[in-house]
Amino acid sequence: MPIFKYKTFEEAERALWNFKPDEAYFKRVAELWDFANQLNPIRYPRGIFKFKTIEEANRHREEIELEHAREIQKKRKSSAPKDMK
């Protein structure tokens, strides 16, 4: 594996970008998301919800996902060693 040297953090960050993704790239991304979902799946509420706009529906989904992230953060803080809190 080659070693690269960068002068700035921004330069190193730009090197991670993929401007010409191929099919293998999208397959790896899909596998990553599948793996993340297996490790910590989001539990969406059961039922049917009516929304007047797509923005309202997206806002509802984002609230559920944010709450999920907050729960993970809370669990990590409570299980961290006392000197890490």
Image (cartoon, helix red, strand yellow):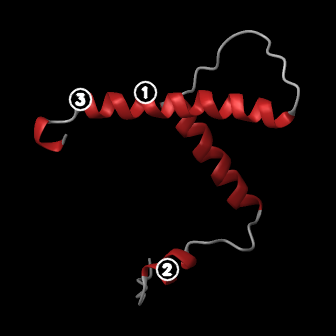
Q: Quadrant of the N terminus?
A: bottom left
Give the mark nearest the N terminus, 2 or 1: 2
* Number of the front mark, 1 or 3: 1
Q: Quadrant of the C terminus?
A: top left
* Residue 25 coordinates in the image, percent (x, y): 69, 60
Name the residue carrying label 1: 71
Give the mark nearest the N terminus, 1 or 3: 1
Mark 1: which secondary structure?
Answer: helix
* Residue 82 coordinates in the image, percent (x, y): 12, 35
Q: Is residue 47 above or below residue 65?
A: above
Q: Quadrant of residue 56?
A: top right
The disc placed on residue 10 is: 2
The disc placed on residue 82 is: none
Please, what is the three-letter code of the amino acid marked with disc 1? Glu
- How many numbered marks appear? 3
* Residue 38 coordinates in the image, percent (x, y): 54, 30
* C-alpha span from label 2 to label 1: 32 Å
Name the residue carrying label 3: 79
Q: Nearer the viewer, residue 80 or 22?
A: 80
Please, what is the three-letter code of the amino acid marked with disc 3? Ser
Circle 1 Cα neighbour tier, 10 Å, few/some/many (<14 / 14–19 / ≥20): few
Q: Residue furthest left?
A: 83
Mark 3: which secondary structure?
Answer: helix
